[in-house]
Image: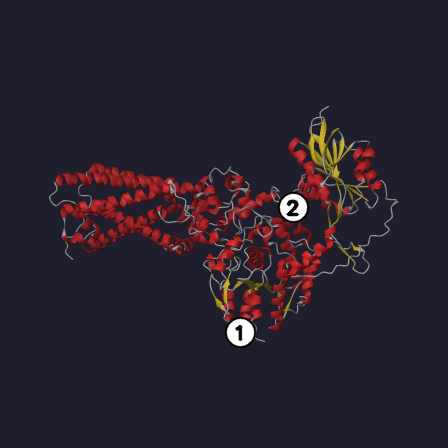
Amino acid sequence: MIYLPYNIIVLIKQILDIDQMKTNPSTGEPITEGVPMRIENLSKNAIEAAVRIKEKSGGKVTGIIFGGEQSSSAMKEAYAIGVDDGIVIKGYKGKNPSVTAKVLSDKIKTLPYDMVILGNQSADTYTGLLPGKLSSLLNVPLLGNAVSIEPGEKEVKVTRVLEDHNVILKGNFPVIISVSQEINEPRLPAVLQIIKAGKREIKMETASIQDSSSIKVLSDKAPKSERKKEVYEEPEKAIPVLTRVIKEAML
Amino acid sequence: MAAGIVSPTLVFIPELELIILYVTSFSAAIFVLYWWYRSYSRLGISITAILDYIRKNWKAMISQALSYGAFHKKTVRNTYAGVMHLLIFYGMLILFISTSLIALSHDILKPLFHFGILTGTFYLNFEVWANTGGLMLMAGLCMALYRRLAKKIKLESVFDDYILISGLLILSIEGFFLGALKIALFRNGFDIYRYIEWYLSYIFPAGMNVNTAIQVYRELWLVHILTAFALAIYLPFSKFSHIVLSWTNVTIKKFHPRGELSTPFLLSEALETGNIDFTVGAKEVANLSTPMKIDSLACTNCGRCERACPAVLSGSDLDPRLVVQNVKAVVYNGKVEMVPGILSENAAWACTTCQACVEECPVLIDPHSFVIEARRNLVMENKISKEMGQYFNNLTNTQNPYGNSPSDRDALLKFGPKYDSSKEVLYWAGCMGAFDPRGKKIAETVMGLLTKAGVNFGILGSEEKCNGETARRMGEEGRFQELVMQNIDTFKRYNVKKIITACPHCYNTFKNEYPKFGFQAEIVHHSEFLAKLVDDGKLKVKKTNETVTLHDPCYLGRVNGEYDNTRFIVNSFGNLKEMEKSRQNSMCCGAGGGNYWYKVKSQDSISHLRMQQALDTKATKLAVACPFCNAMMDDASRSMDAQNKIEIKDVAELISENLEN
């Protein structure tokens, strides 16, 4: 069986823009109110990887977001990058990767696919559990931490990056590939492209399972950092101080 | 004057040759006229459109044809080239009129009405003028030849240039010899009015054989006529075409504020109607607007833009002359891609939009608009670098280039009150004023001065958002217009009537670009506002002996024609020592058009070149009026180890330092 052109599913996560999040200086708790949402960076890498495969070898990219009503804006952006079809599953409550994996795998099972591409973790919780859980639920092999994807006619070659060396893996379709940020530089769609993409239909669905969370957040307070905050405006004054501090730290 | 003075025109020329002359000159004229029409009809402009345009704009056309064409308004800005061009232009014009008068007198009036006009005093005047015209032409051509062969300037010289210069030189030499030979044959006393040919005529021996001389005259005449027609036929295929195409361009040019870029679409309209099927930017030459194509046809390859362009001076890939020349070469074909066919990706990003090229062009071409169209397409094709992507992302997410939290802008409220409807004027600190440490200090200083002078002002704090200037110049029109809509909302909510900006770029965009989107207010840069406060005595400045040089920000100076307020401020306390490149010839600091936010490959850095020019003045202070210029010059002085030699200060800081308490 020849798999060209490919059916690719890309899993997209929408998170709070943590770069804009502040903590309450007295309680140390994060202030989430008014913080805008964005596509998680590794999801952008995943979308870019999927779209590049499609551009090179043809095929179709289906994006799935497990999120909420507001996730359609993220899907519009994904469309602008090159995703063909979008499904938003509402009902994401966060925090529990098992629920996320179940909801997503149930949806994936109803779709044709050769590759499922996703980021290997996300910047809000950093559990990194989703790719493995999906692999187990779908009974499909996981080629994780990919920095390059080279799909062939029957199998796909993936370069996985480890700390001091790379491993090249091959897998038969279908496969799950989780990507690391080194895989590519995601393109930035122009505003006009996002608006154009926004005219296309997004399938809105509701998750079958409601989150019966077995995970509790015990604390999400920012660690206290006692910073001295000395500001030097003249390099001549700053350099001796800096060299002294660095020397002290090295001792 | 004696009645016997008449011109012995065409006396030796047999009928057959005259018939050849009439036929060829008539067909050459038809050919050139047809080519002129075709030059524009091939761009898809119909004859009715041309006539309609003339009917509506004939007054402006006449005035532009005279000022930019006949009177060389911009050409003379470069003295040597200007004088050279004036000599050639007026030399040829006088000779053209002389020849036409001969044709009128000899070929029309004499055969039909049996009288000539080239008689008596008029004839003598005519000959003085004709000789002077020839002399001017030859002088101009010699200057041109010298400029190409011996003068050390950056100027592309190709075979075509030498054909034209030598062709015209030969033509004028032939003309002079024909006249001289005729004088030698007849030698009337009044021929001395042909003052060059008179003296030249003595090279022919007094006792020469008359028949041989006549034979020589006839042959030389034929050669002269053929040279002239060869040049006429050559016109459309050579640089000569600029006589027609450049003059046409300056005549029909529509002026708009220099600081306003074209608006390819209205985002608000597109969102309302849902109609978004338009192309933005130029992927191919064919996508360029018709006025831009007409612009490219007018380019004469004179290289003034290239000699003024900071991107060229720094050795980057960009060359505005080549951009326009490359477009011109394929303007009718149009299938050539702008990038990389016309300019490379690197070149497209190297433009600082300083508009030195626009200022320089003697025939009113806007070379930088081609770069903007190329960028717009690159953005639509997502061909942008990581830094540019980051820049756009930050604008979308945080409405400032740094990606800092928008609420951080509230920190400025320590130095100035929040704007409300009771305030007379809004001080717009800009992103540099809010986030750049140096910019913050300047904003603080300006607010201190405004408070001291009792100005009823306020600031918007976190309600201020980037005005989108740089995004627009980087080709991301959509993000620009998103920000425009958000800011105009705020302005309308507060009913803002007057804005003081910290940054010349904000100033330009509010002043020249926001009106198109429905916002108009009085916009002043802080240099203008503070200069007025000093002038009115509301801020008293004490005189020092400091020598200060001044860097003109492109978007105050060249783009908006404001040179005097910054100079007034500097002279109010110190002695201004101008840099070699100043006012409209000022050189960009290298930050404009987005270049502050990304790196483009080049040999030198523009800011270092400019810093060197400042150091050459031996001034101890460098006055700037733009936070980006400030940052660029500051960076240059650090890397050139010039911090001890020159201090970089905003004009507001200079006022503040020299206040009388």
> Residue under circle 2?
B274
**Quadrant of the image occupied by residue B429:** bottom right
Q: Name the residue under label 1.
A: B542
Q: Percent x, y for residue B218? A: 19, 39
Q: Where residue A197 sits: x, y (%)? A: 67, 42
Q: Which residue lies furthest to the left in this view?
A: B207
Task: State how many labels appear.
Answer: 2
The amino acid type, in three-letter code, at marker 1 is Lys
Quadrant housing the N terminus of chain B: bottom left
Foreground residue, A246 or B397? A246
| Chain letter of the residue beneath label 2 in the structure image | B
Q: Which of B439 and A235 is in front in this view?
A: A235
Give the x, y percent position of residue A60. Answer: 70, 33
The answer to whether residue B272 is seen in the rendering is no
- At label 2, the amino acid type is Gly
- Which quarter shows the C terminus of chain B? bottom right
Query: Residue at point 33% right, 47% down?
Result: B145
Give x and y (percent) for residue A219: 85, 52
Disc assigned to residue B288: none
Gap between marks 1 and 2 measured at Cα? 60 Å
Disc 2 is placed on an element classified as loop
Residue lying furthest front: A251
Identity of the residue drawn at 81% across and 56% down: A29
Q: Mark 1 vs mark 2: same chain?
A: yes
Q: Nearer the viewer, mark 1 or mark 2?
A: 1
The crowding category of the residue bearing disc 1, from other C-alpha atoms within 10 Å (few below 14, some 14 to 19, many at least 20), is: some
Chain for disc number 1? B
| Residue B154 visible, this orientation | yes
Say which quarter of the image contains residue B539.
bottom right
Q: What kind of element bears circle 1?
A: loop
